[in-house]
Amino acid sequence: MEKKVNILFQPWKKLKRLQDEKLSFFIRRYLYPFSPYYRKLLDKHKIKPSQIKRVADLGPIPFTTKKDLINLQKSRNPEERLSILLKPSEELIKKYLPKKEALKFLLSSILKGKQHLKENLEKEFRPIFLTATAGTTSQPIPFLYASYDMDNLKIYGKRIIDVMGMKKDERTLNVFPFAPHLAFWQTVFAGLASNVFMISTGGGRTVGTKGNIRTIVKVKPKFLIGTPSYVYHILKTAKERNLKLEFLNRIVLGAARLPQGFKRKMADLLGSMGAKDVNVIGTYGFTESRCAWVECPTDIGVSSGYHTYPDREVFEVIDSETGQVLPEGQDGELVYTGIDARGTALLRYRTGDLVKGGIVYSPCPHCGRTVPRVSSDIVRASNVKSIQLTKIKGTVVNLNNIEYCLDNDPEIDDWQIEISKKDDDPFEIDQLSLYVCLLKEAKEDTFKERINQQMLSQQEVTFNKVVFLNNKELETRIEIEEAVKAKKIVDRRVKN
Ligand SMILES: [Zn+2]
């Protein structure tokens, strides 16, 4: 388990050296020998594992994309399907490990027997757990963990709890939906590893909002962790019932990019139920990384960025067009390399996530941690859709940006976007509809014009239809109680 010295506070120079060493070691000792996929890739491009001595040497290695992973998944050959996993054998050890390293293994095999070596390798490498991508648009892709990765999941969990500033005697309610998703399990393991009291209810589908609120009233948690829509729904329901929640003032949300307006709405809501000094903390993670990163608590208007783990991964920011690595602080696409993985191991994985403000390497001004921080202005890869709003040509619409605008809007309580075909005719143009519930102070007649003007100037689209709903009607539409993920954006166009 983690050493006594808190690695997240070590001088960056020292951390950087450690990161370079671990990267080089990982590729030589684990990735190249035991990952059929990456051995083939490096061989094909004539890159020797010994050439990679530091992060700066990664440049010539081709990126791995989501499409590559989907193609592997589709393969009929089971060996190819699993080729992205680390799978050692005595033969591979003899053939690919540096001599000194190989000798260690083989010596233990001679002294303690072949069975002993096999058992040891199995213990370290056998996949025992998985989380999968949510798979709303494509087949879910599974990511496998060996027991070594489970230990890492705990280490990340402990760091998350530390960065969020949770103390031993503070309680937490985890309302992430119970599913084989990273968010749920990372949170559970964070609680287990940190020796803090946490109840994981499984969200709305298991115990219902009533059950969650009953638990909040009984347990009095300081922290509430879950998806933005569901946590907001719980708080609104509690408010309707005139509950006092003065003990609850740390909201942690599974959302990489939280609009300030949304943070403010949450804080105001909690404030009206008696809470003071409310912090709303964002988290970033993707199934492929098998871990999550968090912001440290700050005022509503500022974000610390995500505190990363340089001893466990390497982040690069690249120009999405050219693939060139960009310097500190520049906008670009996040690329992830795990340097302490078993199970599914990824090298230079293109996340597709675009980060404004890139990565910074100066110590965090809020908590003093010295680790690289990824800006929290991240536009996720999902939800970029081609929409044909006119007969002329399709427009690529980034629904993430629209989502951000709507969440940030001071007049909107909740919303849903629907994409459909005009008159439900598959040959017609697309239509964009907004179903919206406004906050009490807002006026319907002025809203429609304002929101469309704003959409036009910021997103270059307008809603063909704006439908006003009350809270109940909207919550039924987004299936807040039943769905694993609230249905905020629905695409009703006929699938080709
Ligand atoms: Zn910080």
Image: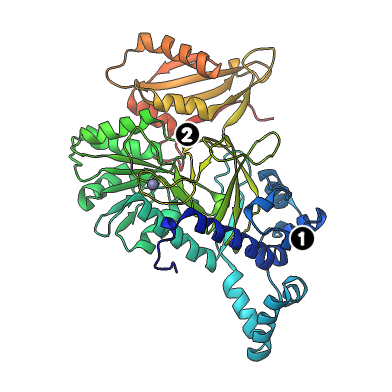
Circle 2: residue type: Lys
In the displayed structure, 339 sits above or below 268; it is: below
Question: Is the CB–ligand 1 distance for label 1 below 8 Å?
Answer: no
Relative side of 306 to 172, left or right: right
Circle 1: residue type: Lys
Relative side of 239 to 105, left or right: left
Residue 207 is situated, as x and y percent measured from the top left of the image, at: 34, 49
Q: Observer-nearest residue: 324 or 271? A: 324
Query: Can you identify the residue that label 2 sits on?
Result: 487
Q: Say whether marks 1 and 2 touch (CB < 8 Å).
A: no
Residue at image x 72%, y 74%?
A: 93
Relative side of 279 to 371, left or right: left
Q: Is residue 209 visible?
A: yes
Residue 160 is situated, as x and y percent measured from the top left of the image, at: 40, 53
Residue at image x 65%, y 61%?
A: 24
Q: Residue furthest bottom?
A: 111
In whole angstroms, how far apart are the C-alphas of marks 1 and 2?
47 Å
Q: Is residue 132 visible?
A: no
> Where the C terminus falls, by quadrant?
top right
> How many residues crowd mark 1 within 10 Å: few (<14), some (14–19), many (20+)?
few
Q: Which mark is residue 48?
A: 1
